[in-house]
Image (cartoon, helix red, strand yellow):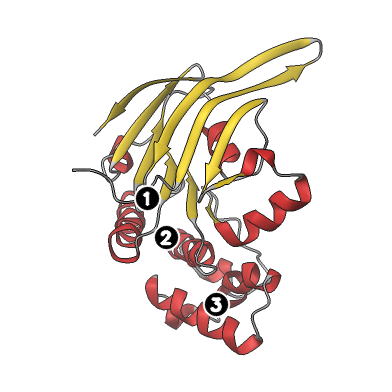
Amino acid sequence: MEKLRPPIVVIKDLNKSYRRGSQIIPVLSNITFDIDEGEFLALMGPSGSGKSTLLNLIAGLDKPDSGVIRIGGLDISALGEAELALWRASNVGFIFQFYNLIPVLTAFENIELPLLLTSLSKRERKEHVETALQVVNLTDRMDHYPAQLSGGQQQRVAIARAIVPDPTIIVADEPTGDLDKASAREILELMERLVHEMGKTIIMVTHDPRAAEKAHVVRNLEKGVLNNVLP
């Protein structure tokens, strides 16, 4: 069946290397693939294979040496630093392994942070945060600080923070890596809901085969090269 929509992410001939002293170390070589809107993609591979580098490039946290990264029709690889920062604020939701919550802010205030960069009024921000809290089932914890929450609850706050600006894509770097088995399962089920019920596009780096099983597509990186695509 022919696709009705173009891919939300288009990556073509992507190359990235880092300099260590006088040595040039290649990290990604000629990476080309697409991600459909509403797809749940897992990036797997051994440590040092370039997974997090690729995720950072897609999220606009780093720039490639060459190649194209087009997201929602925009070539972000051609943007300057200031333009890229503005684009990230409204188009990328971040989920990290260690949550990256601000300890002195409540769950509500942590979730509200991305909205402070927008033109939304205080009332509109409140409505958005309350909706995100409902999605992650934490309305009863909105006034709690991170230290008062379990690891799974903190990650749910982080997910609410990621979705509150209604981003084009969500990038998740080892989102279950610091959680026990039960909490990890809850987080993965929540991420599945974001895809199936809200149509979110998620790109997840993981070492966990059980996490990768939840994805629609698994792409494997080996020494900076994409080896295969697993359904």
Q: Would residue 227 appear left or right of 223 to someone viewing this image?
A: left
Q: CA distance from mark 2 to mark 1?
A: 8 Å
The x, y position of residue 54, in whole percent, is 54, 33
Q: Position of residue 85 (x, y in %)?
A: 71, 53
User: Camera-side residue: 77 or 118?
Assistant: 77
Query: Considering depth in this image, is 142 or 216 the residue closer to the camera?
Result: 216
SS label for mark 3: loop
> Going from the N terminus, do you reach mark 1 or mark 3 first?
3
- Amino acid type at image mark 1: Asp
Alpha carbon separation for disc pair 1 and 3 = 21 Å
Nearest the eye: 206 or 227? 227
Residue 180 is marked as 1
- Residue 195 % position (x, y): 33, 57
Q: Any mark on residue 152, and which? A: 2
Q: Position of residue 220 (x, y in %)?
A: 38, 26
The secondary element bearing badge 2 is classed as helix
Is there CB contact under 8 Å for labels 2 and 1?
yes
Circle 1 residues within 10 Å: few <14, some 14–19, many ≥20? few
To which quarter of the image does residue 53 belong? top right
SS category of the residue bearing label 1: loop
Few, some or many residues within 10 Å of mark 3 (<14, 14–19, 20+): some
Q: Is residue 98 left or right of residue 203?
A: right
Q: Is residue 194 above or below residue 53?
A: below
